[in-house]
Each structure stands twice: as C-alpha cells, then as structure tokens.
Image: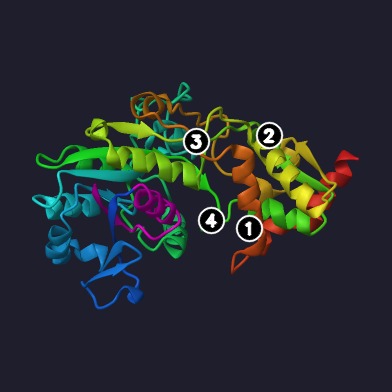
Amino acid sequence: MRILLVGGNGFIGSPLMRELRDSGHEVALFHRHADAGPAGADVVRNQVVHIQGDRNRLSDYRNQFQRFSPDVIVDLILSSGEQARQLMTTVREVAPRVVAISSMDVYRAWGVLHGVEPGPLEPLPLTEDSPLRTVRRLYAPETVKMMQSIFTWVDEQYDKIAVEEAILNDPVVSGTILRLPMVYGPGDPLHRFFPLLKRCADGRSSILLPDDFAAWRGPRGYVENVAHAIALAATSDQAAGRVYNICDEPTVPELDWQARIAKRIAKQMNWPGRFVVLPRERTPKHLLLPGNAAQHVVATSERIRTELGYQERVEIEEAIQRTVAWERQNPPSTINLQQFDYDAEDAALAQVA
C-alpha cells in the first residue's frame, strides 16, 4: 500500500513509519522539519518520501499528496475540529480513507476524573460505545499552553471529540478513529517515568503516593505496540468507518504500575527503597492530583484484538526496561523542582513513623 503519514516523524510516528516501511509499504511523511529540503518538495530518503510543509496550510500541498497517490492517510497530530475538516476537504480525490489518532480523553469518564463532567461515576470498562464528554473544553487554558510547549501541533481549540466528528461524518472520505491511552516508551516527550527515576537516583528511601491515586487505574500503551495497532488499522479495509480503543490489558492500579517500574530501576541502580501510601489529607500537596480519582479509566481493547488481530509485540517487562534505559540517558531539558519537595515528603514520613 501507499501510506501518507501526517506528523509521522515524532514519538509514535517514527516506529509506525519503520514498521510500515519494513512491511513493504510505500510511505510518505508530511512534516515541517527544515532538513527535508525546499518547502513543498518531495524528497526521497531511506525509501521514504518526505514532504515538508505547514499542516495549518494543508491545501497548499494537495498536488504533492496527489503525486504520491496514497491509499490511506494517517494523521497523528490532529488537535481540533477545524484541523480535521481542513484535512478531509483537502484529501478528497487524493485518498479514499483517513485514519485519525484520537485519545481516550474523549470519554465522559475522563471528564469525571478531571472534575469537569457533572453526574455520577462512569461504569467500566469503557468500550468504543461508552458515553463521550458533554463538556467540550476539558483542559484549562494554562494546561493547553503547557501542552503546546511540548506538542507544537496542539492549538487553542483542542478537542478530540470535534476531530472524531469531522473524520467520521465526511460525505466522501471514509474515516477510522483510534483512541490512544497514555503512551510511554523511548522518546516520550512527557517523560512519564522521570519523576520516579529521579527520586530513585536521588537516593530517596521512600516513594510517597496518596491513597486515592495509588488505587487509581488508567490506560497505558507502549509506543511500539501502539504504532503496531495503528499500522494494522491503516492497512486493513475492515477498519473503515470503525472506532478502536488501544491499550494494555489488564489495567493495573498506579501503585502496582510504579512498583513494576521501580523494580526495573532497582536492578539497574541498586535502589533499596519502598512505597508508602498515605491518606490524601496527610500527603504533601505537590504529590496530590486534582480531580476525582474515584473515577477509574479502564478501557477494553477487545474490538481491535478481535477484528484486526491486534496483540502486543513487546511484552510489558521488556517495554518498561527499554523505557527506563532511555529515560536514564535522556532526562528532560527542564525540570520542575517543585514536584520534588523532599523536605515536605520527609515531614510526612516522620508522621508515619
């Protein structure tokens, strides 16, 4: 197949591109990196066509897209309904199908977790037919700005529900939606493992967790496994018009997840520490998370496993080992030291003793 990846040279796009290329598909990447060549030019490197351009001016590159003549387009960096509508309008008569990367934050349960969605807790597990949020603005403006500092493709109108609506309701181009979990692995721009790794490296004897967060269960996926799921959806005609959850199963509590990571860190760094779970009211403020942790976000990925034959290529223990090794070699360039208030943590531990 001929597959065009929009934003395909990032955290998830890079392993996706490699898998598609290694499976014999012809791949084109649309991105804005200046090393691709003159703006709008088609450059072939390592059996991959690179098209440099600005995704906010997508229609300017219709001729380049048509020249590649993709069978399917995978857009990894859709942020708003406007971006999605522009995409679908641009690719009419270019490609018959679009695969759009969405997020499990579309579910009502995610809104309850963040404290923006009224009403009772959402029943679990979440299927692709579970209710979506009724409150469309999930993140506060300052949170969106923080996201933009990490993910340059995020715009002020971030709304994955609007993205899904535009993709699935287009009258001409068929759409596929993939709802992603919290994705970890080498190259993670959020450095999800770093806070725990730093505490271990700093010789902290105890890692503190508030009791509500320690028990919370949320969806995760290793980056190469997520990329594999996207590749299956992109190359399967059966995925047309379908929505799929992607996540590891089973979904374990946060305490168990962090203990797994710490076990791997301990083998590499001889960390002899322990985890201490504290009542929320006795936990230092910098360790508390806003929202309603009573709302777990446990999703089922049975549909993509049954319909497309998805299964993880990398086992969880190996995935954790690779991520820890990468994080040790690639710490974030800036560190928010407020999240490492060890004096407050020592004071809370003294009360336990």
Q: Is residue 59 visible?
A: no
Q: Disc 3 designates what residue?
A: 312
Q: Position of residue 55 (x, y in %)?
A: 25, 63
What residue is drawn where x is 21% and y is 73%? 41
Image coords of residue 233 (percent x, y): 32, 38
Badge 2 or badge 1: first in the primary sequence? 2
Instruction: Determine contact: label 4, label 1, CB under 8 Å.
Output: no
Disc on the earlier residue, 2 or 3: 2
x and y, in percent, of residue 238 in the image: 25, 30
Q: Is residue 200 above or below residue 181?
A: below
Q: Earlier in the sequence, mark 4 or mark 3?
A: 4
Say which residue appears at 32% left-offset and 49% top-offset.
24
Query: Which residue in the protein does label 1 denote?
Result: 327
Cα–Cα span, label 1 and label 3: 22 Å
Tell which circle, 4 or 1, labels the residue nearer the N-terminal end. 4
State the separation of the CA atoms marked 2 and 3. Answer: 20 Å
Q: What residue does disc 2 label?
A: 256
Is 165 a magenta residue? no
Q: Nearer the viewer, mark 2 or mark 1?
A: 1
Numbered disc 2: secondary structure: helix
Whether tag 2 and tag 1 are in contact, CB under 8 A, the answer is no
Three-letter amino acid code at disc 1?
Answer: Glu
Which residue carries the number 4 mark?
190
Structural crowding at the residue carrying mark 2, measured as other residues with C-alpha within 10 Å and reported as few (<14), some (14–19) or many (≥20): some
Please name the amino acid that badge 2 sits on: Asp
Magenta residues? 1-23
Above or below 104: residue 46? below
How far apart, in angstroms, are the residues tagged by discs 4 and 2? 21 Å
Q: Residues within 10 Å of mark 3 (few under 14, many from 20)?
A: some
Residue 18 belongs to magenta span: yes
